[in-house]
Amino acid sequence: MVSDVVDLRAFCLAVDLRSLTAASTLLGESKATVSRRIARLEQSLDVALLRRSPRLVEPTEDGVAYRARVGHILELLGDANTAVRQAHAVPSGRLRVTAPPEFGSVLAPHIAAFNKRYPAVLLDVVVAQKILDFETERLDVALRVAGKLPDSPLIAHNLFEIEGVGVASPDYVRERRPPRRPQDLAEHRVVLMGTECSRHPMPFAPADGKGSAMEIHVKPTIAASDLNFVKEIVLAGGGIAFLPTISVRRELDEGRLVRVLRHYTLYGASLYLLHDGGRFLAPKVRAFRDFMLDAFAAKGRRVNGRA
């Protein structure tokens, strides 16, 4: 039985470098010690692994096959050692994160708290509505809103599901009779977060979880690509919009917005945290991921009402 990992490393280096002298230099040992290691390895296996000559060291046929298998094992061992070291390393360095602008009030406190816990991590937060490429933008983490994520090598964690609620200004509901059913939206001005005023499918579900979901096609009168801009239009009496609860909570509490279609919610999107799908994560990325997952309680947490 082979009992010394260094014997295996010595053998692999001798094969790769075709020299005991070169192998001994890399290991920081004498040539005689390296030679004894390989001889001990051959004796334990009862197989000749190397052919030695004054000018060259070559593996035997058994040595070539053994080198291939042992090399894979040593790589796995190296990966395991690296993983353990990284897991216990102090998170530090620059962390580049992209986040959607509409959830700034939700994400900013957690990012500030993360920075307080890990002061050695310098945060570059790129707030952008569009999807940024990881490689081009040198991103470490992306926070993205999506109904369904496209296939990619990235690892995705569902921070929370997003439910949209119908809101309008008090002046708007005083001027017009509020809708009682989603179908009634055809008689109202609807403000949509989007890029054009075309007929748009809106998936509704009963707020109490009872009954069946339905999809209503609504043609908006105003479309805007930014959630905060949509909210400002609604505050100005521009119509009805369905916005994430967490983005209108303050306005509802202050009475600047009121709920419409209280018995229905708009569903179908989540906020995801994405990072590279490599075998080992940098400590700063792992720390940020774990911190955010813990901050939002658990994967797939539903953010609704005052949760």
Image (spheres, rainbow, N blue to C red):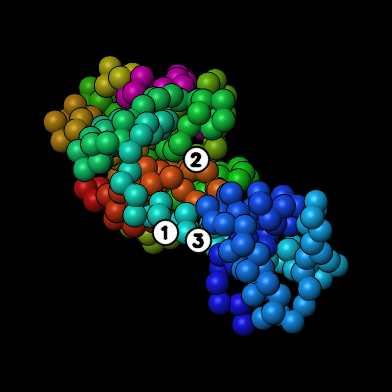
Circle 1 crowding by C-alpha within 10 Å: few under 14, some 14–19, many from 20: few
Q: Are marks 3 and 2 in contact (CB under 8 Å)?
A: no
Marking on residue 84 = 1
- Looking at the image, is mark 3 or mark 2 nearer the viewer? 3
Q: How many marks?
A: 3
At label 1, which amino acid type do we have? Val
The image quadrant of residue 176 is top left
Sequence-earlier tag: 2 or 1: 1
Q: For mark 3, what is the residue?
A: 80
Residue 135 in the image, given as x and y percentages of width and height: 57, 30
Q: Are marks 3 and 1 in contact (CB under 8 Å)?
A: yes
Circle 2 crowding by C-alpha within 10 Å: few under 14, some 14–19, many from 20: some
Judge by depth and name the residue closer to the eye, 61 or 58.
Answer: 58
Residue at 34% from the left image edge and 23% from the top image edge? 228
**In 3D space, how far apart are the residues under numbered discs 2 and 1 (Cα atoms)?**
34 Å
**Is residue 258 part of the magenta span, yes or no?**
no
Judge by depth and name the residue closer to the eye, 216 or 71.
Answer: 71
| 178 over 151 or under it: above or below | above
| 216 over 18 or under it: above or below | above
Q: Which residues are magenta?
A: 218-231
Q: For mark 2, what is the residue?
A: 146
Sequence-earlier tag: 3 or 2: 3
Q: Secondary structure at mark 1?
A: helix
- Looking at the image, is mark 2 or mark 1 nearer the viewer? 1
Q: Are marks 2 and 1 in contact (CB under 8 Å)?
A: no
At label 3, which amino acid type do we have? Ala
